[in-house]
Image (cartoon, helix red, strand yellow):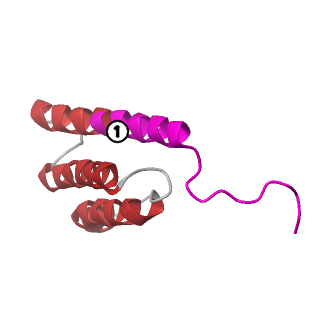
Amino acid sequence: MFTESTRDFYNHIEPFIWYFVAILIIPALRKHAPVKQRLVLASIVCVFGTSDFYESEAWWTPWWLFLWKAISLGAMCLMGLHIRKLSRRAGPRNPVASDGAK
C-alpha cells in the first residue's frame, strides 16, 4: 500500500509528531492537572517519541527498544490515571452554571 520511500519519510518525522503531541498536552490538560504533572506527562511522551529514532526494522526489535517503548507507555498510562484521579478529586476548575439558565 505504501512505498518504501513513504514509510521511510514517516519514520523520519514520527519522533517530531510525538514532540508536537507533547507540546499540545501542556495547554490541553490545564483544567485537569497542575503544570508539574502536565510537564511530567509531556516529558514521558518525548521520551517515547525519541525511541522512534532508534527503530530500524520494527518497533519490537531489538529487545531493548521494545522495553523502552513498553516502559514509556506504562509510564504514560500511570501518569494519565494519576491526572484523572487528581481531576476527579479537585472537580472542575472553571465550573459552568448548571442551573440551565442561558
- What residue is pinned by disc 1? 79
**Chain part drawn in magenta:** 75-102
Q: Is residue 77 magenta?
A: yes
On whether residue 82 falls in the magenta region, the answer is: yes
Q: Position of residue 9 (x, y in %)?
A: 27, 68
Q: Is residue 17 left or right of residue 61?
A: right
* Quadrant position of the N terminus in the picture: bottom left
Q: Position of residue 50 (x, y in %)?
A: 17, 54
Name the residue at 50% across, 57% down: 31
Residue 68 visible at all: yes
Measured as percent of width and height from the top left, residue 41 is found at 31, 49
Q: Position of residue 55 (x, y in %)?
A: 17, 49
Task: Mark 1: give few (<14), some (14-19) or many (20+) Cα within 10 Å.
Answer: some
42 up-or-down from 3: above or below = above
Q: Is residue 61 above or below residue 8?
A: above
Label 1 element class: helix
Query: Residue visible at 19% across and 50% down?
Result: 47
Where does the C terminus fall, quadrant-wise? bottom right
- The answer to whether residue 40 is left or right of residue 34 is left
Residue at the (80%, 54%) spot, across then down: 98
Camera-side residue of 96 and 40: 96
Amino acid type, callout 1: Met
Whether residue 60 is visible = no
State the residue in front, 49 or 80. 80
- So how many labels did they put on this image? 1
Q: Residue at the spot x=18%, y=45% of the render?
A: 57
Q: Quadrant of residue 19?
A: bottom left
Instruction: Quadrant for residue 63, please give it.
Output: top left
